[in-house]
Image: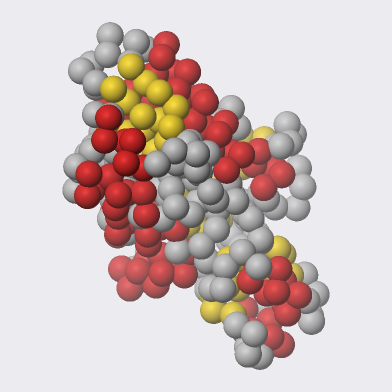
Amino acid sequence: MNRNFGKVAVLLGGQSAEREVSLKSGAAVLAALLRSGVDAHAFDPAARALSELAAFDRVFIALHGRYGEDGTIQGVLELMGIPYTGSGVMASSVGMDKWRTKLLWRAAGVVTPDFELVSAESDFAAIEQRLGLPLFVKPANEGSSIGISKVKAAGELKAAYELAAKSDPLVIAEKFIGGGEYTVGILGGQALPVIRIVPANEFYDYEAKYLRDDTQYVCPCGLDAALEDRIKEEALQAFRVVGGQGWGRVDFLMDDAGRHYFLEVNTSPGMTDHSLVPMGAKAIGRSFDELVLNILELAHVG
């Protein structure tokens, strides 16, 4: 059954720092589409001219990071009039930028950890004092925890800033919230069950996300049912504030007092065997292949 999708391009690979993860996501998506009888084909924009996309009827975006998740490829597909999965140009661009996401969320009343922009001219000691230690430092426009570090001792912020600045000139320092890491997958206006993430190492970094087998994913997540329902509604609102469409993921943290803080939005989540949206879908009885078809059905222009 091909559900009249026509010829489908699965965009994978690309040029970002997350290329290897994207290749895995794209391969999993492509295999699922082929199993479902869809006329699907791999398309790596790092190796082929984007003009070749004119031969396709629909695009599944399995790119992560810059040029694939930041509104760039979405703009190309808008101009070409080809339906594509996920969020549009603006939401993709804003969602990729953690600083601007936080500014929007704060303006809309979405609770997010305290943060500050950091530059080479910053008073590092003053930022450490204002936000408290430990704190996290991260590039504003990278995903998969690339360039992120945890500052645990006074005087370490400068080195953490310099590491993050190698990935992006826009760097944020963020207050540490230590009561647990969680995520909410979003599919077609529905929030999937919350998943608690328990990394074996100090925080949910690139290695924990993609390379280790000892990261634990807990679903049901252990939160009170009423609280989980409220967080899911707020996650949908947080997604809507940035203009999210189709599918995505909203990450949040809990503090030791049981308060939650939304961390970031992911508009092109991973689709590997370690990925979180497929886990959330599985928790409501939806197979990986069904999830992929659902996402493709939500493809749009504009």
Determine which quarter of the picture holds residue 103: bottom left
Q: How many marks?
A: 0
Residue 7 found in image quarter = top left
Q: How is the image coloured?
A: secondary structure
Q: Which residue is drawn at the image coordinates 28% and 9% (left, top)?
A: 1
Q: Nearer the viewer, residue 256 or 211?
A: 211
Query: Residue placed at 69% from the left, 86% from the top?
Result: 124
Residue 133: x and y, percent?
71, 74
Image: 214 above or below 250: above
Residue 192 appears at what percent x and percent y?
A: 40, 35
Relative horizontal placement of residue 43, taking residue 211 as reference (left or right):
left
- Give left or right: position of 260 versus 226: right
Residue drawn at 77 percent across, 47 percent down: 201
Q: Position of residue 271 (x, y in %)?
A: 50, 32
Q: Decide if residue 65 is in sight here.
A: yes
* 184 vs 154: above or below: above
Describe residue 63's horizontal placement relative to residue 217 as left or right. Answer: left
Front-lying residue, 5 or 211: 5
Which residue appears at 63% of the width and 90% of the height? 121
Q: Quadrant of residue 301?
A: top left
Image vertical order of residue 269 relative to residue 264, above or below: above
- Residue 228 seen anywhere in this rendered image of the structure: no
Q: Position of residue 132 (x, y in %)?
A: 67, 78
